[in-house]
Image: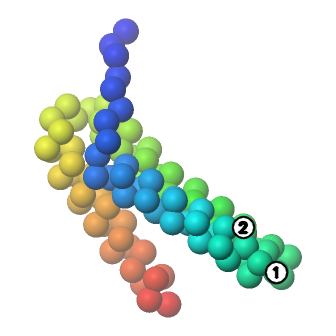
């Protein structure tokens, strides 16, 4: 069985920062998010679970791409694509 090393890349670092940001926001805004039957907390859990998708993409990319430079470039392109897709929702 081949040994698999999970390396730090741009995509998983950005995903970890996104999830950490969601957790910190949830902790500091808990009183606001838990009002009105707690739907704000449910929304934050949904946002955190969306942050897991790039981690899974990065896991698959690392399994197939061995060259770290190529992996980081593709990861950066995936991260930029995700940001562009969510930009209309961020602007409101």
Q: Position of residue 55 (x, y in %)?
A: 43, 47
Q: Position of residue 57 (x, y in %)?
A: 38, 46
Q: Earlier in the sequence, mark 1 or mark 2?
A: 1
Q: Position of residue 24 (x, y in %)?
A: 58, 66
Instruction: Please tell me whether mark 2 sits on a helix, a strand or a loop.
Output: helix
What residue is at 74 percent from the left and 82 percent from the top? 32
Colouring:
rainbow
Quarter occupied by residue 87: bottom left
Q: Nearer the viewer, residue 62 or 21?
A: 21
Against 46, residue 5 (above or below) is above
Outermost residue on the top side: it is 1
91 left or right, relative to 4: right
12 left or right, relative to 10: right
Q: Are marks 1 and 2 in contact (CB under 8 Å)?
A: no
Disc 1: which residue: 35
Q: Position of residue 76 (x, y in %)?
A: 24, 58
Outermost residue on the right side: it is 37
Instruction: State whether residue 12 appears in this view.
Output: yes
Q: CA distance from mark 1 to mark 2?
A: 11 Å
Q: Nearer the viewer, residue 8 or 3?
A: 8
Disc 2: which residue: 42
Q: Nearer the viewer, mark 1 or mark 2?
A: 1
Against 62, residue 58 (above or below) is below
89 left or right, relative to 48: left
């Amino acid at each position: 069985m081949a040994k698999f090393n999970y390396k730090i890349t741009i995509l998983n670092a950005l995903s970890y920062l996104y999830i950490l940001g969601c957790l910190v926001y949830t902790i500091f805004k808990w009183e606001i998010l838990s009002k009105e039957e707690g739907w704000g907390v449910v929304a934050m859990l949904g946002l955190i679970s969306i942050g897991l998708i790039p981690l899974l993409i990065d896991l698959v990319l690392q399994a197939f791409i061995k060259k770290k430079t190529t992996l980081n470039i593709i990861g950066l392109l995936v991260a930029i694509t995700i940001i562009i897709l969510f930009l209309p929702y961020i602007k409101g």
